[in-house]
Image (tube, helix red, strand yellow):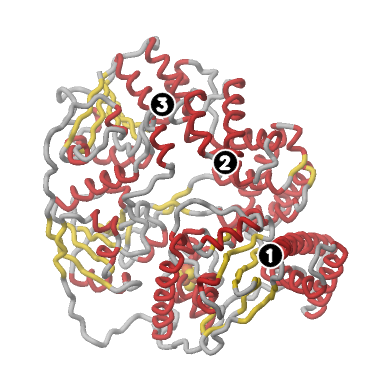
Amino acid sequence: MLSVYLYENSTEIYNLEPLGNSEEKVVVICPHPMAADSLRSRISDPSRAEVITISKFSSDLLNKIDEEIILKRKADLLGQLATIWKKKLSDYAADSFFDSFNLFTELRGYSLDFEMIKEVLPSYDEAIQKSLPIYWMYFEQLGIVDEHKANEILSHHLKIGISEEVETTYLFWGFNHINSGQIDFINSLAIRNKVIIPFPKEVFKQTRPGDWIRWFKADELREELTEFKRDVKSYFFPKKRLAQKLKEILDVEEVEQIVLAEKKVTLDSCLEVSVLPTHFRTTADLFSAYTKRAIDEIESVVGEGIECEELISCVKSKVAFELSKNIEEKNFRLIKVYSSLLKIITDYKALSDDNEFIKFYDVQVVREIISLNLPRDYFAPISNLEKKISILGLNELESSEDVESIFLLTDAYQGVKKGGSKYQEDIMKFLSSLGPIQRPELEFLMVREKFRELLDKGKIIFCIQEGLVESDRSWSEFFRGVEFLREEIFTPKVETFRNVLETEGRSFDQKVSASKLQTYIDCPKKFFYTYLERKEIDASNSKDLRPNEIGSLEHEVIEKYFDKVRNWDEGVLRETVSEVYKKFVEENRKLLSEVKEKISLYEIYNYSENGVKYILNILENMVGSEVSFEAFLADKEFVSGRIDCIIKFEDKFIILDFKRSGFSIPSKGEIEKYSKIQLPFYLKHFGGEIQDVLFWGFVNLSNTEESLLIHGGHELGKDFMERVGLGVKTRKSAFDDLNLWFSEYCEFEDEVIEELKKETLWRANPSKDDVCTFCSVSNLCTRGSV
Ligand code: SF4
């Protein structure tokens, strides 16, 4: 028997109220370990409830049915399907493989019957249309059991009955979404057991017929929405002044718990509010910098292609080299990364003869697999102080204590978003006939409901960035019914701040460049040590070329090549590479080993070739255009900097920046939100009008197909991009109305420059998690050393 239990407050679940009597025991199934942990700590009578995750429950049951069944993990499937792609579909871009893989795993959540799914294929590109039937057939023929197939097997056996099955009460708790296969599984479980699915009553009133909860048999609820109204004492602070405001608030308020407006708290966001001993748990990114380093090394070894055996021995020698160091010098994280890579590459090779030879595409596959395979680590500060403030995110509201709390909201936090769907409307319509579609608004309503429970307790105050709620649709909706009672703190005019690293008092009065502005946006303290009191460690070494040195050499080669010819000529490129390289090593007194020199020259030649061919393609398709490199920005009075490449076609422009790899290219979203400003800065200062820019973006010299190009928001730009064979993405973006986006950017830039010119405090305030990871002055800064 299955029932949906509509609750008004989560405490009903913690007190096990949905159960029939006070003796009844229950198995509670949660979506992930975090939900299970928080429920265990809240349940009023733990002796009556066994709490487990759904993956543990399914794999135990699967094992009971047939211990021979091997459930394949996502990382294994990725390697297998990548090999199939290479065999049959390698004419398409490597990116398309990853898109097709993700879509494949998603669609299997709707149905395992390909005949049903194939209806959506015409809405996707050719690569997807060709690849998905092949993947499906491969799974069928080899009888591969992924999580979706496992659900089907479990449903089947539960329907016919599993031997020694004892009637049990199950409660499914904490799910934001349940897919079609899981619905079938839960319904089958309910044939011989009692299954209860609790769901917040107020949210249920706002659900739509296609939402996952409505796929279970639930009684209609004909009640009006209950009006929500609460007054909350609220402090406000200007942008980027959270830490300062929080310190003032904590001088006048007793707070035992901090709730951040982040879905998942990050180490940086916790450290930013770490004004007192705090207690929190965040994921720790222990391996990403080393993984990037190791993959970059592999990329440069692989170049145009390499025998897999040769690559394996290269990685083995790297492991051996690290292991041969003294214990104090051994880099254990790097050893872990190299060893994982070794296993992944060896397993990948064993999949097929096609993997005996490794190319750039295979390295991307290995990169994805290692990111799935490396251990998930957590960071939790240890302190023996009794008084500690807990920090939670919006996804952990269930773990919140009934104590005095403060809710912090800044524009840097990733809150819950109300709208958006990853599917086009027609696909969504079709898929909704097969199973529930994940709807961000439903998740939004569920989080808001939990947050409202917190407000109901009356023990929370707010600390909110000025103007943010009014300007953000999702936050305005999140706080519907909340009255902010503005509270001020009166402090003496002269404030004294503890000046640990003596960054205060100095100001910046020089010209601004894109990189300076970016550094300031990334972190004021980093700016101080990079530009005002240069403490950056110069890692220059006569026996090596640094990545930025190799990048500059590649830029120079491309420029010098076009000084000589404007058509493809391999001999000219070889000659240019050799001239530029020779001059550089002489001037900089570099003495590289033969192997290192070979590897560097190999990259410089190949990446420059990619750049040259990319530019040539544009020039050939836009007859009469002129190209210039290292062009100075026009506003020389106020700003400094040069643009890698400007192509002028009649009175129109194309603005390009060269990058050595995709890693240094920002995402479209980061540019849209002005968190990466290099190119918007160029657009503002290049000396022309935005309407005259046909397209602009970053050219990825390692793989030009993975460049990021943005059209000028008008048909002409799109036409020209298509004319030179650069695909135009159809996804909606802020760039569709480029003029509006750009005028808002200009205002943003003016404000940040004004702020920079007035800055005297230079606080450690990194804008994102990874800013500290790659900060060259992190060794001077307590934030960075954590
Ligand atoms: S380590 Fe982080 S907080 Fe410190 S200066 Fe660098 S970016 Fe800023």
Identify which residue, 563 or 470, lies in the foreground: 563
Badge 2 element: loop
Callout 1: few (<14), some (14-19), or many (20+) C-alpha neighbours within 10 Å?
some
Q: Which residue is mark 2?
A: 125
Q: Which residue is mark 1?
A: 622
Disc 1 residue type (three-letter): Met
Picture quarter with the N terminus: top left
Badge 3 element: helix
Identify which residue, 67 or 320, lies in the foreground: 67
Task: Name the residue located 24 percent from the left edge and 54 percent from the top edge.
Answer: 477
Identify which residue, 61 or 434, lies in the foreground: 434
Disc 2 residue type (three-letter): Asp
Task: Name the residue located 59 percent from the left edge and 80 percent from the top edge.
Answer: 641
Q: Position of residue 346 (x, y in %)?
A: 70, 38
Quarter of the figure with residue 43: top left
Q: Position of residue 421 (x, y in %)?
A: 39, 45
Disc 3 residue type (three-letter): Gly
Badge 1 element: loop
Task: Name the residue located 61 percent from the left edge and 39 percent from the top edge.
Answer: 127
- Picture disc at residue 181: 3
Identify which residue, 208 or 282, lies in the foreground: 208
Callout 2: few (<14), some (14-19), or many (20+) C-alpha neighbours within 10 Å?
few
Pointer 2 with pointer 1, Cβ within 8 A: no
Q: Is residue 44 left or right of residue 657?
A: left
Instruction: Say which of marks 2 and 3 sits in front.
Output: 2
